[in-house]
Image (cartoon, coloured by chain):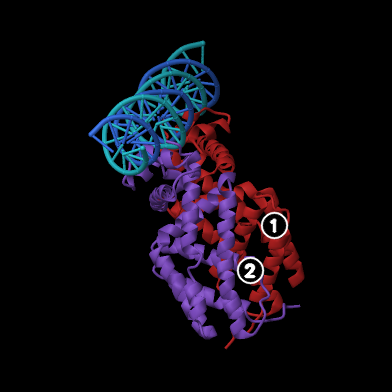
Chain colours: A red, B purple, C blue, D cyan
Amino acid sequence: MQKVTRLDRISPQRADKFAERRAELAEAALQTLSELGYARTSLREIAQNSEFTHGVLHYYFRDKVDLILCSVRQYKARCVTRYDRVTADAKSYEDLMTGFLAALAQTMRDEAHMHRLWYDIRSQTLFETAFRADVAELDKSLEDMIWRIMRRFAELTGEPQSVSPSAIYAMIDGLFQQCLLRHLSGDPRAIDQMQADVRLVISKITSSSEPPA
Amino acid sequence: MQKVTRLDRISPQRADKFAERRAELAEAALQTLSELGYARTSLREIAQNSEFTHGVLHYYFRDKVDLILCSVRQYKARCVTRYDRVTADAKSYEDLMTGFLAALAQTMRDEAHMHRLWYDIRSQTLFETAFRADVAELDKSLEDMIWRIMRRFAELTGEPQSVSPSAIYAMIDGLFQQCLLRHLSGDPRAIDQMQADVRLVISKITSSSEPPA
DNA sequence: GAAAAATTTTGACAAGTGTCAAGTTTTTCT
DNA sequence: AGAAAAACTTGACACTTGTCAAAATTTTTC
């Protein structure tokens, strides 16, 4: 039992096994967090969503923070390429728009619980410095993801992009977050409305216009 | 001791006294929540930020949820008129813009902890149905507050508003939230950047333009 | 000023928390 | 197969949590 010096002089297959189990437990943590939220998630609850008992968590993770950080990183890996297929496939402005809006709607429907976990963790970051670095990095990755789409829009229209990547991301994120809350509150029009809003905003953003005098 | 039937047949001054203390304790709760965040705020901690001991909280509030709801409502009353002075005073587009951006910056600097509390509570709403109604109502009030400003912008330019109130609110809220995280993380350029972003976005939104073909 | 009511404190409760150490079981290696 | 290492379970610890009832205190009422 050397969970600390584990990565030294250990056969690669051993290390893989270790990492695999870590990933498995991190997955259980994600499941639990997305179900209960950060404030109500306990280690025992996480263990119950896995095949193991609560003690094993301290065999694979230093402490609770370590586990949650691992979970967040794992979450990240899955979602930062979510729209890349859309960008690659689009042949026209309307193509890209339709594809993007469809992808937004789909992830809202299928992964709403994961999204609420993300906003919960990011809010924790406003209080707890422990998660800040990782959350900032993930946030940047999401910004880049959105920016890739916006660059493609600009390519297809020929007009230059005047709004900064971080601002566009923040706005679309705001619309997405608003939709998530409505969607989880049972509003059936939430997704349609978000699609209309995002469409309009992108059209406004990607077209040049003079600011009023 | 009739904390339930209290409002019946009680002299108004008594009821006021009761409401006053409730407000006082709710204020202590706000203080604590904005300092520690929802996940780490306990009733004993709240009591320590007041002049009383923890037991008194159950004299004035049914339970923890009741207390927090009361706090949120109290928070609301203070902030939904934040920008109304700006709207009233502005004589020109640039006037309104400058005033709004200055007000945004000031509340970001002065009340950052309260803002992070708001985003924390709103995230809780994604999991807990208890706060949903109140948070939705407050969110709507904030949307109205922003809309009053945007209507004024439209008045001053003469152009009609094409983006919906909820969409504009969501976008500005997204920019504000992003700034808050950066600001609390110690980024000195966060506020300036937000001001520039908000300015650009409003100018794009309040000017008519054709969506690209 | 005594009785009654309202207010506040104190201390306890059951339940839940993160953490960890001492076992038990399983796997790996020779 | 037997020893050693790894993986996992169990049960406990010190502490915190929301809640509440009983006692102590203050305020009001007559």
Depth check, front residue: A8 or A63: A63
Q: Are marks 1 and 2 on the same chain?
A: no
Residue A200: x %, y % from top left: 69, 71
Q: What amino acid type is highlighted by mark number 1?
A: Ala
Picture residue at 57% right of the left edge, 39% below the top: A32
| B138 sits to left or right of B34 | right
| A22 sits to left or right of A160 | left
Number of residues whose C-alpha sits closer than 10 Å to that of mark 2, classed few (under 14), some (14–19) or many (20 or more): some
Q: What amino acid type is highlighted by mark number 2?
A: Pro
Question: Can I make out residue A131 in this image?
Answer: yes
Q: Looking at the picture, does residue C12 appear above or below residue A198?
A: above
Picture residue at 34% right of the left edge, 48% below the top: B49
Depth check, front residue: A85 or B41: B41
Picture residue at 64% right of the left edge, 70% below the top: A150
Query: Disc 1 designates what residue?
Result: A190
Depth check, front residue: A135 or B181: B181
Q: Looking at the picture, does residue A2 appear above or below residue D11?
A: below
Chain letter for mark 2: B
Picture residue at 66% right of the left edge, 60% below the top: A84
Badge 1 vs badge 2, beta-carbon distance below 8 Å? no
Q: Looking at the picture, does residue D18 appear above or below residue B145?
A: above
Q: Could you give the CA–CA distance between mark 1 and mark 2, rounded to whole angstroms? A: 14 Å
Q: Which mark is residue B165?
A: 2
Chain letter for mark 1: A
The secondary element bearing badge 1 is classed as helix
Residue C5: x %, y % from top left: 40, 36
Task: Locate the C terminus of chain B and report the quarter of the image it occupies.
Answer: bottom right
Number of residues whose C-alpha sits closer than 10 Å to that of mark 1, classed few (under 14), some (14–19) or many (20 or more): many
Residue B161: x %, y % from top left: 66, 77
Q: Which mark is residue A136?
A: none
